[in-house]
Image (cartoon, grey):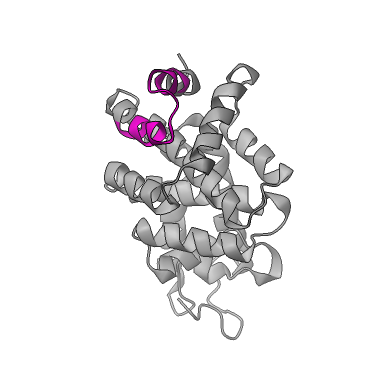
Amino acid sequence: MSIWSRLGDFLERTGATMAGLRDALFQLASSERRRDITFTIAMIALSAKMAKADGIVSFEETEAFRRIFAIPEAEARNVSRIYRLAAGDIAGFEAYANDVVRLLGDDPAMLEDILDALFAISKADGAIHERELVYLERVAAIFGFDERGFARIRARHVRGSKADPWLILGADPSWEPERLKAHYRRLVRENHPDRLVARNVPEEFIAIANDRLAAINDAWNAIGGGAKAAPAGAGQGR
């Protein structure tokens, strides 16, 4: 039985109440697929809450959500119900974010995966709106990321000339070439999609890993593949 069907069955048994969704986060998370299910519910709930942040649920954001999760047509009803429950839940997004920390706080990489997925959904309509950015920053703070950590994640989702490659890499122009190269290689290993598979991240999120690795490689190329030279001001504000 799929995650979606299991969630749907659970909500049927609990009467599909608003509180039932958060109950599911804990009751289903005790199963053998704990992380898959926790990750999935967290993304549905936090995505729904983010959609309310700017008051507009765009078609592009909805489609991005469906692409990331590769939702089968047969499960669309269950997913829609869960999404509506999360959007209408009287509990604020902070409650869901804290639930995620309670269950996944020992895995900061998983928390970063969730933030990356939220960014991907947010920018699907062509821009990350100010209220969405405030929302994402508050979620990141609950997850334990400081300002620099959040800025690094955010930078991966800013493309073109505005992106700071040093910030994306979490590196500094003053580093020696060998140190910089070793740092880059470690980032590639840690963020390779195969590493996510080994961590039992749901398969649907491999696309997020591919985007993250692409941003890292773009940043590496932008600094000249290890060149120490950097434009004036590069690496500041970290």
Q: Is residue 199 above or below residue 190?
A: above
Residue 63 in view in this figure: yes
Find residue 42 and report its image quarter: top left
Nearer to the camera, 8 or 119: 8
Q: Where is residue 19 in the image (x, y as percent from the top left)?
A: 38, 35
Find residue 223 and report its image quarter: bottom right
**Which part of the image, by quadrant, shows the C terminus?**
bottom left
Which residue is at 48% across, 51% downward? 115
Q: In this view, does 226 lie above or below 19?
A: below
Q: Is residue 146 above or below residue 215?
A: below
Which residue is at 43% across, 74% downward? 176
Nearer to the camera, 42 or 48: 48
**Which part of the image, by quadrant, shows the N terminus?**
top left
Which residue is at 49% across, 77% downward? 173
Q: Where is residue 104 in the image (x, y as percent from the top left)?
A: 31, 43
State left or right for residue 101 relative to residue 165. Answer: left
Magenta region includes residue 23: yes
Secondary structure mainly formed by the magenta segment:
helix
Q: Position of residue 144 (x, y in %)?
A: 33, 60
Nearer to the camera, 160 or 124: 124
State left or right for residue 134 relative to residue 56. Answer: left
Which residue is at 29% across, 23% downward? 31
Residue 198 in view in this figure: no
Magenta stretch in the rendered image = 8-26
